[in-house]
Image (cartoon, coloured by chain):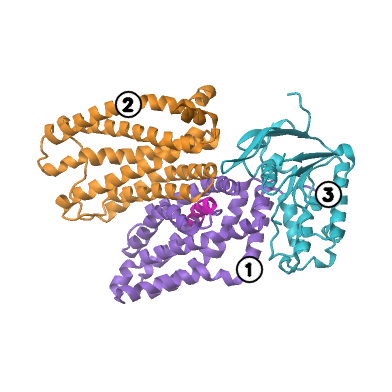
Chain colours: A cyan, B purple, C orange
Amino acid sequence: MSNTALLQINDLSCIRDDRVLFEHLSLSLDGGQMLLVEGRNGSGKTSLLRILTGLKLADAGDIFWQGQSITRLGADYYEAVNYVGHHDGIKRELTCLENLRLVQAMGKPAPIELDDALEQVLLYRYGDTPVGNLSAGQKRRLALARLLVTESKLWILDEPFTSLDKKSMDYFQGVFEQHIQNQGMVVMTSHHEMVMPGPSLKRLNLSE
Amino acid sequence: MNRLSLTQAFIFLLRRDLTLVFRNRGELANPLLFFILVITLFPLAIGAIPELLARIAPGIIWVAALLAAMLSLDSIFRSDFDDGSLEQLLLSAHPMPVLVLAKVCAHWLVTGLPLLIMAPVLAEMLGMASEAQGILLLTILIGTPVLSLIGAIGVALTIGLRKGGIILSLLVLPLYVPVLIFAASAIENAALGLDVSAQINMLLAFLFLALSLSPWATAAALKMSMS
Amino acid sequence: MYLWFNKLGSPPHFYRIAGKWLPWLSAVFALLLITGLYGGLVYAPTDYQQGESFRIIYIHVPAAWMSLFVYVVMAFCGVVIIVWRMKLAEVVLISSAPIGASFTFLALATGSLWGKPMWGTWWVWDARLTSELILLFLYLGVIGLHSAIDDKRIASRAVAILAIVGVVNIPIIHYSVEWWNSLHQGPTVTKFDKPSIDMRMLIPLLIMALSFQIYYVIALFQSSRAELLRRERNSKWVAELSGGN
C-alpha cells in the first residue's frame, strides 16, 4: 500500500434502519492534523466516531492505523486512542481524583501530577469531592481531563464542548491546538466553530 | 510512567467495584434479603412439616440461590453501561476478558459471598441435617461463582435492551441446570451420609470451565452490545 | 477456500441456487416420507413389549435427533459469523432457530403422547424428555434474544455468541440430567432405544431420519430466502428480482 498516513479510512459505509448514513467514505489523517466532522443531527457523526474507535462495526470498509486494520490491532490500537463520547464515562460515586486514577490505570499514564491536571481543568479544590456533587460542566471538564492524564496520539471527541462555559471552551481549544502542534491527531464533532491554522484542519461534512 | 501490569489492572478494577458497592451500601443487602424471603415462603406454602422441609431443604436453598444470583446479575454492568464507563473499559489498553473477570469477581464477593454467610442459618431453620451443612457451604462456595460467570454472559448480551430482565432469565436459567443438579444432589447425599466427591468434582470442573471460557464470551458480548 | 466461501455466501447466489434446488428436494422428501411412514407404520413388526404404540418412534426419534443437529448447525453458523462475519450464516442461524424449536417441540409432544399408554401419564421426568425441555428453552432464548434486538446485524452477533455458549453447555446439561435421572429413578419402564433393534424396524427409522433431514433443508432454504429478501431489500439484486416480475 502506498498510503503512509497514520489513520486511513477506506471505503467506509454505515447503514442504520435502511438509511444510508454515509457510503464509500475514504480519507486519511496524519500526525499534526485535526478532522472536524460536520453535519446535521442524525447524519452519522457519532456513528462515524464510534466506528473510528472500534466500538461500532462499519457495514463496509476498513480503518487502518499505521497500515494495520484496527480490528486486528485491538488493544494496541486502543493504547493510541482516547475517546470522549456523549457520556462522560466517570463514576458519580467516586471522587475526582479516584476517577482520574482509574483513567490512568486503564490507559497509558502521562507524566503529570493529578493535582496539576485538576488545576488545569479548573477543578483544583474538588479533588476529594464525589463527582455526583459536581455540575454538568464540571463533570465534562473532568471527563476531558482524561486527555491530560493519559498519553495517546489520536483523540476522538464527540461534542467535547457540551455544557462547557466560554472560559473552559477556550482552555480546551488551546489544549487541542497544543496536541496538534505536538504531532497529535484530533477527530471531533462540534457545533462550535474551531479556529485552527489552515493546513492542519480538515473538514468532512456528512450532510452533503 | 509505565502502564499497569495485567495483575495490577485486575486488582485496581476489583477494588474500584468494591468501593462503588460500598458507597451504595443500600443495594448490598438486596440479593440477600431476596434469598431469605424466598426461602421463608416455602414453609408457608407447603406447611411446616419438619420431615418434609428437611427433605426438600437442599433444593429450596439452591433454587433460591439461583434466583437471587440471577436477579443481582444486572448490577454487574448496569451502572458502567449507563454512565459510559463500560465503553471506556472496552477502549482500555488492557485485554477486556481480564477486566470482565475482575468485575465478575467483585460482583461475586458482594452477592455470592453473603449467601455463604446466611446459608447455615437458613439450613438450620429448615431443619437440614447437620452433616449436610458443611457440604451446603462447599457447594455454595464453588457453585455461586459459576452462576456469576455464566450470568455475566447473559447480562452482557442483554444490557442494551430496554426490557432485558425476562429475556435474561430465559437465557441464563437453562444454563444453570447442571450446577443446580449437582449441588442439590451433593447436599442430599451428604445428609444420607454418602460420598459426595463425584458431585464436588463436577462442580469444580464447571467452575474451571466457566472461569476459562466465560470472560471471553462476556467480553465479546459486551462489545456487541456497545455497537 | 475464502473465495469459495465468499461465492457461496453471496446472498444473490444463495438465493438462486436454493430456489433451483427446492423442487427437487421437495420431491425427494415426499418420496422418503411416504416410504418411511409405510415402512414404520405398516411394514415394521409390532413390538412384543410395547405393542403398536412404539410406532411413534418413527416421528419421535428423528425429531429428537434433528433438534440436536439443528442446534449444532446454529453454533457452527455462530462461529462463522464471529470469525468471518458472513451474512449468509446470520440468515441461516436465525432461520434455523424456529425450525429447531419445532423439532424439539415435536419430540416433546410425541414423547408425551407415547408416555400416556406406556406410563399412564402425559409427563414423566425422564432424562430424555427433560433434556429436550431444556433444549426447547435454549431455542426459545435464541429466538427471544434475536427478536428483542432491533438492529438485526447486532442481533445476529448476539445470537451467534449465545448459540456457541449453548452448544458448549448442551452436552453438560444432557449429561447432568442423565445423571440426575439415574439417581432419582422414577416410574420409567423402558427407554426408547434398545440395544438390539430389528432390522425391519431400523430401516424405516433411518429413512424417516433422512426425510426429516431433507425437510430441514427445505424449510431452511425457504425461510432463509425470505429473510434474505427482507434484509437485503435495499440492494440491487433484490430490486432486479422484483423488477423482473
The span picked out in magenta is B146-158
Residue at the spot of label 3: A193
Residue at the spot of label 1: B22
Q: Amino acid at mark 3?
A: Glu
Q: Position of residue C37 (x, y in %)?
A: 18, 34
Residue A112 in view: no
Work out how far the residue at label 3 is from the one at label 1, CA to CA, in angstroms. 44 Å
> What is the chain identity of the residue bearing mark 2?
C
From the viewer's side, name the closer residue of A117 and B137: A117
Work out how far the residue at label 2 is from the one at label 3, CA to CA, in angstroms. 63 Å
> Element type at marker 3?
loop
Residue A89 in view: yes
> Element type at marker 1?
helix
Classed neighbour count for the residue bearing mark 1: other residues with Cα under 10 Å, few (<14), some (14–19), many (≥20): some
> What is the chain identity of the residue bearing mark 1?
B
> What is the chain identity of the residue bearing mark 3?
A
Q: Amino acid at mark 2?
A: Pro
Residue C23's tag is 2
